[in-house]
Image (cartoon, rainbow, N blue to C red):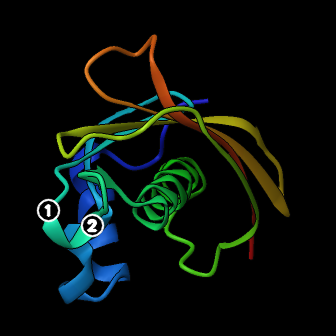
Amino acid sequence: MNPCLSLSELAEFLDGAFPSETRASLGAVVDVQAGHVRMTLDPNSSMGRPGGIVSGPTLMALTDVAAYAVIIAHHGRKEMAVTNGLSISFLRACKMETIIADARLLKLGRRLATVDVRVWQGNEDHLIAQATVGYALP
Protein backbone atom coordinates (compact mmCIF):
# COMPACT_ATOMS: atom_id res chain seq x y z
CA MET A 1 0.00 0.00 0.00
CA ASN A 2 1.74 3.13 -1.23
CA PRO A 3 1.01 6.51 0.34
CA CYS A 4 -1.10 8.92 -1.69
CA LEU A 5 0.50 11.97 -0.01
CA SER A 6 4.18 12.84 -0.01
CA LEU A 7 6.02 13.96 3.11
CA SER A 8 5.63 17.65 2.18
CA GLU A 9 1.94 17.23 1.27
CA LEU A 10 1.25 15.44 4.56
CA ALA A 11 3.12 18.07 6.59
CA GLU A 12 1.17 20.83 4.82
CA PHE A 13 -2.12 19.04 5.49
CA LEU A 14 -1.36 18.63 9.21
CA ASP A 15 -0.32 22.29 9.46
CA GLY A 16 -3.74 23.27 8.11
CA ALA A 17 -5.74 20.70 10.09
CA PHE A 18 -4.58 21.78 13.57
CA PRO A 19 -4.60 25.25 15.15
CA SER A 20 -1.28 27.01 14.53
CA GLU A 21 -0.75 27.70 18.24
CA THR A 22 -0.76 23.96 19.06
CA ARG A 23 0.71 22.47 15.88
CA ALA A 24 4.37 22.64 17.01
CA SER A 25 3.55 20.65 20.16
CA LEU A 26 2.16 17.75 18.09
CA GLY A 27 5.35 16.66 16.33
CA ALA A 28 6.81 16.88 12.84
CA VAL A 29 6.54 14.34 10.02
CA VAL A 30 10.02 13.17 9.02
CA ASP A 31 9.28 10.10 6.86
CA VAL A 32 6.40 8.65 4.83
CA GLN A 33 6.63 5.14 3.35
CA ALA A 34 4.27 2.35 2.37
CA GLY A 35 2.07 1.72 5.43
CA HIS A 36 4.33 3.81 7.69
CA VAL A 37 4.83 7.36 8.97
CA ARG A 38 7.56 8.53 11.34
CA MET A 39 7.21 11.69 13.42
CA THR A 40 9.52 13.41 15.88
CA LEU A 41 8.85 15.74 18.78
CA ASP A 42 11.35 17.89 20.66
CA PRO A 43 9.66 18.37 24.04
CA ASN A 44 9.73 21.73 25.80
CA SER A 45 9.32 22.56 29.49
CA SER A 46 5.52 22.87 29.20
CA MET A 47 5.39 19.15 28.30
CA GLY A 48 7.21 18.05 31.44
CA ARG A 49 6.07 16.63 34.70
CA PRO A 50 7.80 16.29 38.07
CA GLY A 51 10.97 14.25 37.80
CA GLY A 52 12.06 15.87 34.55
CA ILE A 53 10.16 13.51 32.27
CA VAL A 54 7.67 14.05 29.46
CA SER A 55 4.01 13.86 30.51
CA GLY A 56 1.67 11.06 29.48
CA PRO A 57 -0.78 13.45 27.77
CA THR A 58 2.07 14.73 25.56
CA LEU A 59 2.96 11.17 24.52
CA MET A 60 -0.70 10.32 23.90
CA ALA A 61 -1.12 13.41 21.69
CA LEU A 62 1.96 12.50 19.64
CA THR A 63 0.68 8.92 19.33
CA ASP A 64 -2.75 10.05 18.18
CA VAL A 65 -1.38 12.53 15.63
CA ALA A 66 1.06 9.93 14.26
CA ALA A 67 -1.83 7.48 13.78
CA TYR A 68 -3.91 10.21 12.11
CA ALA A 69 -0.96 11.10 9.86
CA VAL A 70 -0.42 7.55 8.58
CA ILE A 71 -4.13 7.22 7.83
CA ILE A 72 -4.28 10.56 5.99
CA ALA A 73 -1.11 9.71 4.05
CA HIS A 74 -2.72 6.49 2.76
CA HIS A 75 -6.45 7.30 2.71
CA GLY A 76 -6.26 10.85 1.39
CA ARG A 77 -7.22 14.28 2.68
CA LYS A 78 -10.20 13.26 4.80
CA GLU A 79 -10.22 15.66 7.73
CA MET A 80 -13.11 13.97 9.48
CA ALA A 81 -11.28 10.75 10.37
CA VAL A 82 -11.75 10.52 14.16
CA THR A 83 -10.18 8.45 16.90
CA ASN A 84 -12.55 5.74 18.13
CA GLY A 85 -10.12 3.99 20.45
CA LEU A 86 -6.63 4.42 21.85
CA SER A 87 -4.96 1.87 24.09
CA ILE A 88 -1.48 2.84 25.25
CA SER A 89 1.08 1.16 27.46
CA PHE A 90 3.79 3.33 28.99
CA LEU A 91 6.89 1.15 29.27
CA ARG A 92 9.54 3.49 30.68
CA ALA A 93 10.09 7.13 31.55
CA CYS A 94 10.47 9.52 28.63
CA LYS A 95 13.38 11.95 28.96
CA MET A 96 13.19 15.58 27.85
CA GLU A 97 14.93 14.82 24.54
CA THR A 98 13.80 14.04 20.99
CA ILE A 99 10.95 11.53 20.82
CA ILE A 100 10.28 9.33 17.78
CA ALA A 101 6.84 7.91 16.97
CA ASP A 102 6.55 5.19 14.34
CA ALA A 103 2.99 4.65 13.11
CA ARG A 104 2.24 1.55 11.02
CA LEU A 105 -1.05 0.69 9.42
CA LEU A 106 -2.35 -2.67 10.61
CA LYS A 107 -5.61 -2.38 8.68
CA LEU A 108 -7.07 0.30 6.47
CA GLY A 109 -10.68 -0.49 5.63
CA ARG A 110 -13.49 1.56 4.15
CA ARG A 111 -14.93 2.58 7.54
CA LEU A 112 -12.25 1.72 10.14
CA ALA A 113 -8.48 1.86 10.41
CA THR A 114 -6.19 0.30 13.01
CA VAL A 115 -2.68 1.61 13.62
CA ASP A 116 0.25 0.39 15.74
CA VAL A 117 2.33 3.25 17.17
CA ARG A 118 5.66 2.69 18.88
CA VAL A 119 7.31 5.55 20.73
CA TRP A 120 11.02 5.57 21.54
CA GLN A 121 14.13 7.67 22.12
CA GLY A 122 17.67 6.98 21.00
CA ASN A 123 17.32 3.22 20.55
CA GLU A 124 14.28 1.64 18.93
CA ASP A 125 14.79 -1.48 21.03
CA HIS A 126 13.93 0.43 24.22
CA LEU A 127 10.35 1.51 23.71
CA ILE A 128 8.86 4.25 25.85
CA ALA A 129 5.29 3.45 24.84
CA GLN A 130 3.28 1.26 22.49
CA ALA A 131 -0.27 1.98 21.39
CA THR A 132 -3.00 0.56 19.23
CA VAL A 133 -5.15 3.31 17.78
CA GLY A 134 -8.47 2.89 16.01
CA TYR A 135 -9.99 5.48 13.69
CA ALA A 136 -13.44 5.78 12.20
CA LEU A 137 -13.25 6.99 8.61
CA PRO A 138 -15.75 9.30 6.89
**Residue at (33, 56) in percent of width and height:** 10
Question: Which residue is at the far front?
Answer: 51
Whether label 2 touches label 1, CB < 8 Å: yes
127 sits to left or right of 88: left
* Image location (x, y in percent) of residue 131: 65, 43
| Nearer to us in this view, 131 or 16 | 131
The residue that appears at 62% across and 81% down in the rendered structure is 80
Q: How many marks?
A: 2
Please identify the quadrant where the N terminus is shown.
top right
Q: Residue at x 20, y 73 (%)?
A: 46
Alpha carbon of mark 2 to alpha carbon of mark 1: how far? 6 Å
Label 1 sits on a secondary structure element that is loop
Tell me the number on the disc at residue 105. Answer: none
Classify 89 as above or below 59. Answer: above
Query: How many C-alpha atoms fall within 10 Å of the one at disc 1: few (<14), some, or many (≥20)?
Result: few
Q: Residue 113, how many percent across, how many down? A: 76, 52
Up the image or down, 36 lies above or below 66; here it is above
| Side of 88 where 125 appears, left or right | left
Binning the other alpha carbons within 10 Å of mark 2 as few (below 14), some (14 to 19) or many (20 upward) gives some
Question: Disc 1 marks which amino acid?
Answer: Asn
How far across and down, in percent of the image, does residue 121 sit? 30, 28
Which type of secondary structure does the marked residue at label 2 adopt?
helix
- Eyeballing the image, is 73 above or below 82? above
Q: Residue 44 got which mark?
A: 1
Which label is found at residue 47?
A: 2
What's the residue type where badge 2 is placed?
Met
